[in-house]
Image: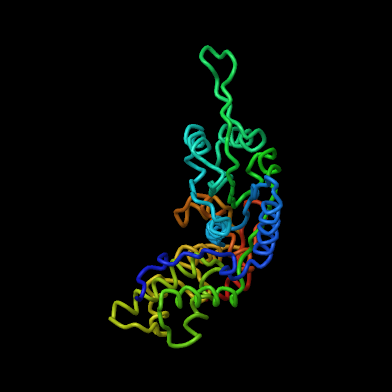
Amino acid sequence: MIGTDINQVQLTSLSHIKGQDKVVDVLNVNLAAYFNSRQNGSGANFGPALLVGPSGTGKSLVAKAVHSELANLDLIEANSEMLTVGELTSMLIQATDETTIFLDEAQSLDSKVQHVLLTALSEKKLFTPKKNNKGCYEIPLANFTLLLASTHEYQIQDALRNRMRIYARFDYYSDNDLIGIVKQRADALKWQYESEDVLRVIAERSKQTPRIALNRNLQMAWNVCSSDNRAIITLSDVIRAFELLDIDEMGLDTLERSYLKELSKNKTMKLNVISSKIGLPRQTICSVIEPYLLRHDLIEKVGSDRCITDKGKSHIE
């Protein structure tokens, strides 16, 4: 059966992960040590583990693969930004020795939530006050597995961050790794493509991140293909997909090109001026627009001043 949605395929093993070789090695070593300890009769736990790296580089995917490798029965997932003390407490009480708790965007955890989590890791207990604040109830906790993912690990409190026993750092992907990832997913979904050029163009316009390569680029290419009731993605389908998405050969979208065009009109510009010109908040520009442009030497910045490079000017001409 041919798939229709990019997320119909889930990876269940670290052996399926392409790229991030160091991350996979770190996790495999710790998994092997964990299973050997269990066979020897010790009560060792896996982790806790902190997966760190840019958005879209596969931290959540790897966390779920680790859960599968551990063969735990239950996976409890939460986005840290909205997690309350009550919700975390409920998770911890429900957890068993066969539970994986995965908290994404851990840098967004409230300080009180971080304190509860730290206590749960260090004491394997929860402490809740009795009536009239006369002492505390102690609630013992199971040996659950904790996985945290973060784009900004140093925004996590030092005490909690330093409690992590496994530290896996993700990086951006090479085009070759992305080609392999796109091919793997297309093959799993039984999406045919006319040549390797289809995979290459999808990868090259993905800003070195699998999430963009798969969820945006490959999915849109398939949608263009299937809209004509065809089953083989052609290079023309890919080009049409990027025309519809308004994505250029470097993977830049309309806003990013608008940013470069505004910069090209001046020697330097202040961040707040650019923000007003293109109608985006300063924080969005700093965290979403600029990182890729800086990595590829399209812009330079000093403090609040931004300027376009010769490479950046050449790209928008």
Residue 197 visible, this angle? yes
The answer to which of 175 and 183 lies nearer the viewer is 183
Judge from the rendering whether residue 128 lies leftward or rightward of residue 169; answer left or right: left
Residue at the limit of the structure toward the bottom, as seen here: 195
Q: How many tags in the picture? A: 0
Residue at the spot 55% in from the left edge and 66% down from the top edge: 209
Asked if 83 appears above or below 58 in the picture, the reply is above
Q: Based on the displayed image, in which of its 4 quarters is residue 67 positioned?
A: bottom right
Can you give x and y, in whole percent of width and height, for residue 163 in the image?
69, 42
Asked if 278 appears above or below 308 in the picture, the reply is above
Residue at the spot 53% in from the left edge and 49% down from the top edge: 104
Q: What colour scheme was applied to this rendering of the protein?
A: rainbow
Judge from the rendering whether residue 163 lies leftward or rightward of residue 4; answer left or right: right
Image quarter in which the N terminus is found? bottom left
Asked if 225 appears above or below 30 in the picture, the reply is below
The answer to which of 317 and 290 lies nearer the viewer is 290
Can you give x and y, in whole percent of width and height, for residue 43 in the image?
67, 45
Judge from the rendering whether residue 36 lies leftward or rightward of residue 224; answer left or right: right
Residue at the spot 49% in from the left edge and 47% down from the top edge: 76
Asked if 255 appears above or below 159 in the picture, the reply is below
Q: Based on the displayed image, in which of its 4 quarters is residue 144 positioned?
A: top right
Can you give x and y, in whole percent of width and height, for residue 289 in the image?
53, 59
Can you give x and y, in whole percent of width and height, for residue 107 in the image?
59, 45
Residue 289 visible, this angle? no
